[in-house]
Image (spheres, helix red, strand yellow):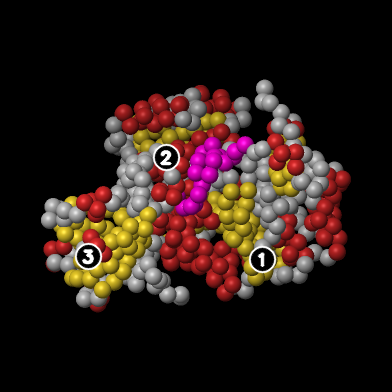
Amino acid sequence: MLSLKSKYRTHTCGELNISNVGEVVTLSGWVHRKRDHGSLLFVDLRDNYGITQCVFDGGDENLEKIRPESVVQITGRVVAREVEAINDKIPTGHIEIQASASDVKILTNSEVLPFQVFGDEETSEELRYKYRFLDLRREKLHHSILMRNKMMKWLRDKMWDLGFSEFQTPLLTADSPEGARSFLVPSRLHHGKFYALPQAPQMFKQLLQVSGFDRYFQIAPCFRDEDLRADRLLEFYQLDMEMSFVDVSDIQAVGEEIMPEMVKTFAPDANVYLAIPHISYDDAMLKYGCDKPDLRNPILISDVTEIFRGSEFGIFANAIENGSVVRAVPAPNTADRPRSWYDKLVEYAVKELGLGGLGYIIFADEAKGPVAKKLDTARIEKLHEIAGDNSSLFFICDNVENAARAAGKLRNKLGADLGLVNPRDFAFCWVDNFPFFEPDEDRAGAPKFTHNPFSYPIVDSVEELSTRDPFSIKAAQFDMVLNGLEICSGGLRNYNPEIMKKCFEIAGYPLEAVEKNFSGLYTAFQYGAPPHGGCAFGIERVVSEILGNGDSVREIVAFPANQRGQDLLMGSPNDVSEQQLRDVHIQIRKKN
């Protein structure tokens, strides 16, 4: 490592300790905090590496005028703190710098701050993003950005150790229908034509496999013009990888090698579940109500349609005859909860889940509740086995899709409300065998790709692909899920030109559209393509979860856009001159 010494400092603000007592040192940094004790003035000096306390005699007007966050240079002698003044919370807490006012040089003065950098003062997102350079000085955010930096190095080193080669792929490329909306860049040299920023390096990494590069990776920037939410950004990074001559298990083995170890390395207090189970998409939707289950929550959803079929509970029995299903969500050890607790859950089901109500049975000494009164002993006993003793069982009756969605959200709420989820537990799983096609509501229910169009269908031939019900075909596609977050998506790629053409045909793309939108990849596949596959891990989601930031991925991004896609610091998106528009052959139409 290069020396950090310069004409501005002999040491950083984070390295001095008791072994330096007696030395004369020079430090430079930001005035983190001042404390005027009358006869003494304490200044906490901060840089990227830590904080050092400096002590001056009180009463000097020039020192008192220095505002917080001004940048100063201080020369003084290292002394040991009095025992009662020791601060074990920081590495420099056993020493302080004794200096005089004449030993202080103001390098730059700060204006009055729009919000405090010191402490945890609540500040609006708008103000924080407008003065992001100040926000980044705050201890927690500064630490998070540095930790992300360390994780990126760790990932790169790990991928190299595993035998992967690092590549860079173009940022100005062709637009292609990959699911999301692309950011477009007009061409100055080619009138009326546009580049697109990559939603992912999907086709380039496949082309590298066709080019014979056996193991590819990059930490790739990706751009998607989507509606924003807490866990979604307009631009983000992913650990992108692709491999030749592999099966699904070979790709997943890389994820299992990397992710648990990364959590243990950067969250040593975490409890990482050793097992990484495989859950089919169908089972995930049934048992967890979503395709990204949080396995820290022990609650499992059950299908109880047959138990209610033909029962005296007419609301459910009649709905079942009309095609509805019934899902049961248990709430362990809740039989002693007051009526108000159940009323609040019913209100949640109506207002948040859009249900007409929420039926339930309480299994105390006996089965209680309106639903129980309408069921015979045999049916109640079957439901009791699902719920367990001293528990409640909630019921959702709707079509398959709505019942799964509502039951999944209720499961998550019960897990959180009952304290069943430990935030420092880390539970991974694989969700496999996604449907290859799903109904497209915009095309009267015709098939469309569920994931990206480059996945390989689990079929043995073009003939099977042509004759089977498209909605029964599964994809060699998987997600890796961590604590209810989708952190990775991947699978085997469709490298066979004939199967590729047939898949696009089923999804409503004629051959001409395939050749136009995917010309480079389609052409390459005519010249010998190896079986290959890969995946990509969402950097922001992984780092955010390890650091305990939850859904707020913006807290580990140095300069994020706000939830309206605006960079308040740099003022983007912004207007450009008429000449700039002419250069790229663009004319702005007034919005109606």
Residue 93 is marked as none
Q: Is residue 209 visible?
A: yes
Could you tell me residue 139's position as x and y percent? 35, 54
Q: SS of the residue at dot 2?
A: helix
Q: Say whether marks 3 and 2 touch (CB < 8 Å).
A: no
Mark closest to the chain's N terminus, 1 or 3? 3
Question: Viewer-nearest of labels 1 and 3?
Answer: 3
**Is residue 208 left or right of 569 when viewed as pictured?**
right
**Is residue 518 left or right of 310 when viewed as pictured?**
right
Could you tell me residue 592's position as x and y percent? 67, 22
**Is residue 576 left or right of 299 when viewed as pictured?**
right
Residue at screen point 46% across, 75% down: 1
Residue at screen point 16% across, 62% down: 85
The residue where tag 2 is placed is: 127
Could you tell me residue 66's position as x and y percent? 28, 51
Residue at screen point 51% across, 47% down: 560
Q: Which kind of residue does numbered mark 3 sit on?
A: Ala
Could you tell me residue 485's position as x and y percent? 51, 49
- Quadrant assignment, res 320: top right
Residue nearest the observer in this picture, 48 or 537: 48
Span of residues in magenta: 555-575
Question: Viewer-nearest of labels 3 and 2?
Answer: 3
Q: Main secondary structure of the magenta part?
A: loop
Q: CA distance from mark 2 to mark 1?
A: 38 Å
Q: SS of the residue at dot 1?
A: loop
The residue where tag 3 is placed is: 99
Q: Is residue 353 magenta?
A: no
Rendered view: 520 above or below 214: above
The residue where tag 1 is placed is: 167
**Is residue 200 left or right of 105 when viewed as pictured?**
right
Q: CA distance from mark 3 to mark 2?
A: 36 Å
